[in-house]
Image (cartoon, helix red, strand yellow):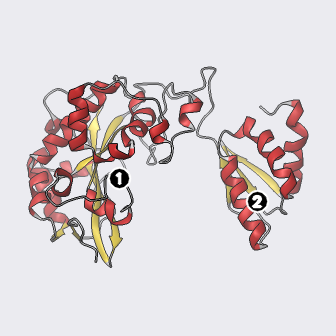
């Protein structure tokens, strides 16, 4: 709630806007004159007490509009992911979700657009990640939440504020065993950019597992996937254009007829070519014993994703 000390500033911001639209937990700032530069820091301080860390993005956009002479805030929004409780977390409760999403990445396609990433610099064709799907994350998920906003269970705001690629390595260290760290170096190349910290604090904290168990289990899923018909199909077709139907057929050889309804494929376009970027498998919660092959579960809104009927399994350094 805005305090009396900054109520005037907040009120002033509302006055200069043509409207403050409140819908659920989303507030949109629309069609307003430009705020004078001298007032922006005071406005930032006033609004941050109410709107979390998104105000800076709005003010940056405002500055750009000011410089360009457009002078309005149409389409700019300040959003709050959820009410914070007295402990400072997002309000999400560990274990209260419907299914897991196992997100596997095809690293060569990822690196087409992220060549400056540590895991992409000097990537060679003989590395595991150049020939196998690798770990992006294991996400506790809620039905209907396609953006996977459920997260940050019990995570302090000061840690949440570091959740961006530039801040991941500044997040607190995780308590992982030597074995888990070794597996992660192979199965999750993004750990070179401290991706595992983001994945733990955003997603893993809601799993009900400790960090070592969480990543050990996720790493084991990558190993299983690489030894499946699905994994062998992908590895055998590096550098080839494949049929989406053939990939989903390979998936069903592992997981049973109709199981591809739990599979979602994401493609990207680079060098005038559609290519596989990521693969999501919806898994049961709780995770049953017996390995990855007994875990897929159909979730409304999943299915085979947005990849076209044919796409490339991109090789390393395919781009000129």
Q: Marks 1 and 2, how far apart in space?
A: 40 Å
Residue 101 drawn at (x, y percent):
32, 42
Residue 78 drawn at (x, y percent):
68, 49
> Which residue is at 34% across, 22% downward?
210
Q: Quadrant of the C terminus?
A: bottom left
Q: Disc 2 designates what residue?
A: 30
| Residue 39, above or below 63 | above
Query: Looking at the image, do the residues carrying marks 1 and 2 touch, with CB atoms under 8 Å apart?
Result: no
Residue 257 drawn at (x, y percent):
12, 49
**Quadrant hosting residue 298:** top left
Q: In the rendering, which numbered label is found on residue 138?
A: none
Q: Residues within 10 Å of mark 1 (few under 14, many from 20)?
A: some
Toward the viewer: 293 or 127? 127
Mark 2 residue element = strand
Report the residue that reaches farthest toward the front.
Answer: 122
Q: Disc 1 designates what residue?
A: 118
Q: Residues within 10 Å of mark 2 (few under 14, many from 20)?
A: some
Query: In front: mark 1 or mark 2?
Result: 1
């Amino acid at each position: 709630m805005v305090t009396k000390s900054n109520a005037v500033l907040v009120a002033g911001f509302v006055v200069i806007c043509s409207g403050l639209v409140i819908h659920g937990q989303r507030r949109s700032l629309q069609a307003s004159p430009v705020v004078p530069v001298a007032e922006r820091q005071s406005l930032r301080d006033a609004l941050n007490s109410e709107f979390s860390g998104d105000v800076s993005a709005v003010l940056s956009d405002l500055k750009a509009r000011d410089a360009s002479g457009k002078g309005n805030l149409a389409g700019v929004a300040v959003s709050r992911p959820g009410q914070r409780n007295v402990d400072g977390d997002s309000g999400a409760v560990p274990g209260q979700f419907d299914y897991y999403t196992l997100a596997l990445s095809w690293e060569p396609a990822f690196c087409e657009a992220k060549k400056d990433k540590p895991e992409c610099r000097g990537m060679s064709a003989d590395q595991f990640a150049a020939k196998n799907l690798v770990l992006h994350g294991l996400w506790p998920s809620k039905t209907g939440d396609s953006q996977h906003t459920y997260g940050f269970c019990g995570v302090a705001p000061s840690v949440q504020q570091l959740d961006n690629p530039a801040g991941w390595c500044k997040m607190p260290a995780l308590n992982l065993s030597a074995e888990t760290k070794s597996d992660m170096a192979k199965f999750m190349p993004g750990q070179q950019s401290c991706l595992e910290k983001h994945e733990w604090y955003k997603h893993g904290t809601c799993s009900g597992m400790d960090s070592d168990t969480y990543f050990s289990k996720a790493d084991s899923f990558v190993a299983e996937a690489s030894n499946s018909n699905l994994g062998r199909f992908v590895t055998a077709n590096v550098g080839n254009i494949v049929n989406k139907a053939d990939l989903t057929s390979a998936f069903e050889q592992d997981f049973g007829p109709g199981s591809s309804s739990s599979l979602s494929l994401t493609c990207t376009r680079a060098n005038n070519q559609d290519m596989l970027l990521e693969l999501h498998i919806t898994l049961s919660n709780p995770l049953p014993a017996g390995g990855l092959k007994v875990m897929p579960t159909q979730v409304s809104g999943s299915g085979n994703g947005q990849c076209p009927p044919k796409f490339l399994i991109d090789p390393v350094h395919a781009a000129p």
